Image (cartoon, rainbow, N blue to C red):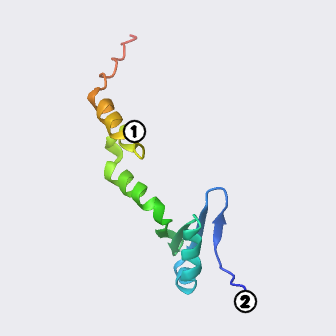
Amino acid sequence: MMVIMTYMTFPTTGVLEVTVATAKARFAACVREAEQGTTVVITKHGRRVAALVPAGDVEELRRLRAAGPKAGLASLAGGWEGSDDLVKEIRRYKRTPPRGIPDLE
């Protein structure tokens, strides 16, 4: 028996979009897609409201969320031996103040 899912897929990004109704009816198939590395985005009334992601992506998502936008690129380092030292070293350097804009009048 072949199961056909009603969905919108974006093959270049590895994202599969399904409605809440489809996700509910085909939950096991959605989980299989996530197991295979596809992000399954669940929509409700055309809005993205939730996602099933591969389990391996959860730690990276947690780290990015914890870093927040103000932590900058240094906060994204990680995942290899010694990366914490790199982050500490980068954070030691302060940004220089912006240059003044000369008055042309």
| Quarter of the image with the N terminus in it | bottom right
Q: Neighbour class for label 2 at 10 Å: few (<14), some, many (≥20)?
A: few
Residue wearing tag 1: 73
Residue 1 — which label?
A: 2
In the displayed orientation, state which residue is furthest to the top.
105
Q: Neighbour class for label 1 at 10 Å: few (<14), some, many (≥20)?
A: few
Q: Position of residue 77 (x, y in %)?
A: 40, 41
Q: Position of residue 45 (x, y in %)?
A: 52, 75
Q: Secondary structure at mark 1?
A: helix
- Answer with left or right where residue 36 lies relative to residue 44: right
Q: Is residue 3 above or below residue 13?
A: below
Q: CA distance from mark 1 to mark 2?
A: 49 Å
Q: Is residue 1 above or below residue 74?
A: below
Query: Looking at the rendering, which quadrant does residue 96 occupy?
Result: top left
Q: Secondary structure at mark 2?
A: loop
Amino acid type, residue under disc 2 in the picture = Met
Residue 89 — which label?
A: none
Query: Looking at the rendering, which quadrant does residue 16 occupy?
Result: bottom right
User: Residue, x 67% and y 60% (percent of image)?
Assistant: 11
